[in-house]
Image (tube, helix red, strand yellow):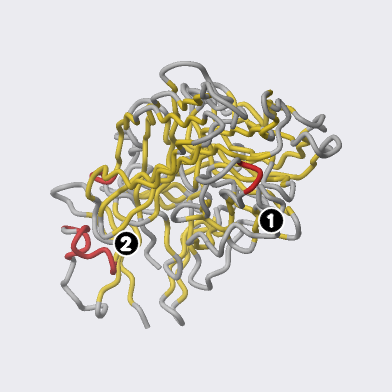
C-alpha cells in the first residue's frame, strides 16, 4: 500500500498481504541501489604460492595484495553478490561453491607441528597457513585483496619440506551499490 | 520538509521517486539523469535493486557437530531449497553468537580456540539449495571441540550465478498502485518483495560489512616455528570479535586492532 504523510512529506510503501503489514519502502530510508554499469562479472587468476623449510632456513609466504578490477560509479561502495574459488589442483572445502561475496573469504587453512629432529611432528599445533580474499571499493575502484600467509613444517633437518597453495581462480558476480541515506 | 515526486518519463518509460525543491518545481533531472543526481534519488527504474521474498527468508537452527582433536574437518548444513534456476546471491546473519548479531559476510569464525584454530562458516548456494558450509581444524593439544549451535536468518536473492542482474518484467505496468500491491518500473520495485534497506535511524536487523572482515598481523619468519610469536588473525565486525590470543611460542598476544567497516541494514 502506498502512503503519504503530509506532515513530514514522507512517502512509504507497506505490504498489507504480509503479517503486520511490514514497511518495504520509505523515503526516509534507502534501498541498496546498483547502477547497471556497476554489475561486475569476471574472474581473477592468482599464482600458486609456495613456502619451504629445511629445518635450518625457511622461506615464508606473506602476501597482502590489492588487485584492481574496475572503476565504479562514485559513491558506490557496498559490494554484494557471489563469488567462488577454484584451485588448479587439489581441492578445498569451499571449492566451486558460490558464496556471499562480502567480507573476507577463507581459502586455505594449514597447521603444522613442532620441530622434533629428525622427525616431523604430525600433530597440529601452530596455525601456519591461511588465505583470504576480500572485495572492497576505494576511491571509486573495485579491488580484491589477496591475503596469504604460509609457512611449511620445519622438518628438523634437510631435505626441505615445501607446501604449496595451488594457483587459484576467483570467479565473481558482484553488485556494487549505494544507499540513498 | 522534503517534497518527494513519483513520476514517469513518457518518452523513455523510466519511473523514479526523487526529491524536488518544491511542489511547483520543474526540475526532474533525477528522472532523466539518475547517475548525476543520486543524492536526490530514492528509486529509478533504470537501476538494479536486488530483492528477496518473505518465503525465501528463513530462520533455521543449526548445529555443527563436535570434532575430535588434531584433525581437519568440513561439512554442509542444508538450510532450504531456493527454487531458482541456478545458484543465487545469499545474505544472512547469526541471531546471537556470543551476545552479538553476526553478519554472515564471507567466512565467519563461530568457534575459536585461543591459539587461532577455529571453525569457520560460509553462507553458500548450490544450484538448488541455500547451505551453510563449515570447515576448520582442531589442535592436537586440546580435547575434542564441542558441538556449536546457533540460529541463522538467511535470504535468497534474485541475482543468480548465471544470466543478467534482476530487471523488470516488460509485461508489467510502469506504475501499479492498488490497495494490496505497489509496483514501480515494471516490477523493479514490488511491495511483495523485500529489499536491502538502510534506515535513516542507523538501526537495522543486521550489520553488513563494506570491506574485509579479517586481518592478519605478525610474521611467520624466523627460527623454528615454536620459537616465534608467528602470524595472528582477527575477525572483527559490528562488535563480534574472534582472534588468536596465543602465539606459536605460547606468548599472550592478539590479532591486532582491526575493525571491519560496516553499516546496519534491514530487509
Q: Chain of mark 2?
A: B
Looking at marks 1 and 2 on the same chain, the residue that comes earlier in the sequence is marked by: 2
Query: Residue at the spot x=57%, y=68% of the render?
Result: B203
Question: Which of B68 and A55 lies nearest the eye of the viewer?
Answer: A55
- Residue identifier under label 2: B17
The x, y position of residue A62, in whole percent, is 44, 43
Q: Quadrant of residue B151?
A: top right
Same-chain status of marks 1 and 2 = yes
Query: Residue at the spot x=50%, y=45% of the render?
Result: B221
Relative to B182, residue A155 above or below: above
Please give the count of numbered marks on the rendered protein: 2
Relative to A42, residue A26 above or below: below
- Which residue lies most toward the top here? A89
Q: Chain of mark 1?
A: B
The x, y position of residue A164, in whole percent, is 47, 25
- Mark drawn on residue B245: 1
The x, y position of residue B228, in whole percent, is 61, 50
Amino acid at each position: 500500500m502506498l502512503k503519504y504523510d503530509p506532515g513530514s512529506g514522507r512517502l512509504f510503501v507497506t505490504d498489507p498481504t504480509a503479517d503486520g503489514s511490514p514497511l518495504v519502502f520509505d523515503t526516509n530510508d534507502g534501498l541498496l541501489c546498483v547502477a547497471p554499469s556497476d554489475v561486475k562479472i569476471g574472474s581473477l587468476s592468482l599464482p600458486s604460492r609456495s613456502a619451504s623449510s629445511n629445518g635450518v632456513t625457511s622461506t615464508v609466504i606473506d602476501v597482502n595484495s590489492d588487485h584492481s578490477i574496475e572503476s565504479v560509479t562514485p559513491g558506490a561502495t557496498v559490494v554484494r553478490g557471489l563469488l567462488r574459488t577454484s584451485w588448479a589442483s587439489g581441492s578445498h572445502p569451499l571449492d566451486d561453491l558460490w558464496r556471499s561475496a562480502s567480507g573476507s573469504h577463507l581459502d586455505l587453512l594449514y597447521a603444522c607441528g613442532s620441530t622434533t629432529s629428525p622427525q616431523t611432528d604430525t600433530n597440529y599445533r601452530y596455525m601456519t597457513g591461511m588465505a583470504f580474499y576480500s572485495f572492497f571499493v576505494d576511491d571509486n575502484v573495485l579491488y580484491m585483496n589477496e591475503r596469504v600467509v604460509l609457512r611449511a613444517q620445519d622438518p628438523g633437518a634437510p631435505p626441505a619440506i615445501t607446501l604449496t597453495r595451488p594457483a587459484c581462480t576467483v570467479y565473481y558476480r558482484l553488485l556494487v551499490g549505494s544507499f540513498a541515506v | 520538509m522534503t517534497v518527494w515526486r513519483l513520476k514517469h518519463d513518457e518518452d523513455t518509460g523510466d519511473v523514479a521517486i526523487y526529491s524536488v525543491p518544491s511542489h511547483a518545481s520543474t526540475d526532474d533531472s533525477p528522472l532523466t539523469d539518475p547517475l548525476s543526481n543520486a543524492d536526490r534519488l530514492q528509486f529509478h527504474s533504470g537501476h538494479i535493486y536486488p530483492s528477496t521474498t518473505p518465503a525465501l527468508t528463513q530462520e533455521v537452527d543449526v548445529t555443527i557437530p563436535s570434532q575430535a582433536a588434531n584433525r581437519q574437518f568440513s561439512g554442509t548444513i542444508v538450510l532450504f531449497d531456493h527454487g531458482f534456476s541456478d545458484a543465487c546471491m545469499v545474505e544472512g546473519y547469526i541471531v546471537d553468537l556470543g551476545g552479538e548479531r553476526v553478519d554472515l559476510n564471507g567466512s565467519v569464525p563461530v568457534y575459536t580456540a585461543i591459539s587461532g584454530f577455529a571453525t569457520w562458516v560460509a553462507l553458500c548456494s548450490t544450484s538448488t539449495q541455500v547451505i551453510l558450509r563449515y570447515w576448520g581444524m582442531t589442535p592436537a593439544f586440546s580435547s575434542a571441540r564441542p558441538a556449536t549451535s546457533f540460529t541463522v536468518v538467511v535470504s535468497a536473492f534474485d541475482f543468480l550465478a548465471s544470466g543478467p542482474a534482476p530487471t523488470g518484467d516488460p509485461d508489467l505496468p510502469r506504475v501499479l498502485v492498488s490497495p494490496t500491491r505497489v509496483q514501480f518500473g515494471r516490477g523493479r520495485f514490488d511491495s511483495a518483495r523485500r529489499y536491502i534497506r538502510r534506515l535513516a535511524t542507523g538501526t537495522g536487523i543486521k550489520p553488513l560489512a563494506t570491506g574485509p572482515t579479517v586481518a592478519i598481523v605478525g610474521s611467520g619468519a624466523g627460527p623454528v616455528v615454536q620459537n616465534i610469536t608467528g602470524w595472528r588473525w582477527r575477525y572483527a565486525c559490528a562488535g563480534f570479535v574472534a582472534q588468536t590470543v596465543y602465539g606459536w611460542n605460547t606468548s599472550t598476544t592478539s590479532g591486532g586492532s582491526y575493525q571491519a567497516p560496516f553499516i546496519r541494514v534491514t530487509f
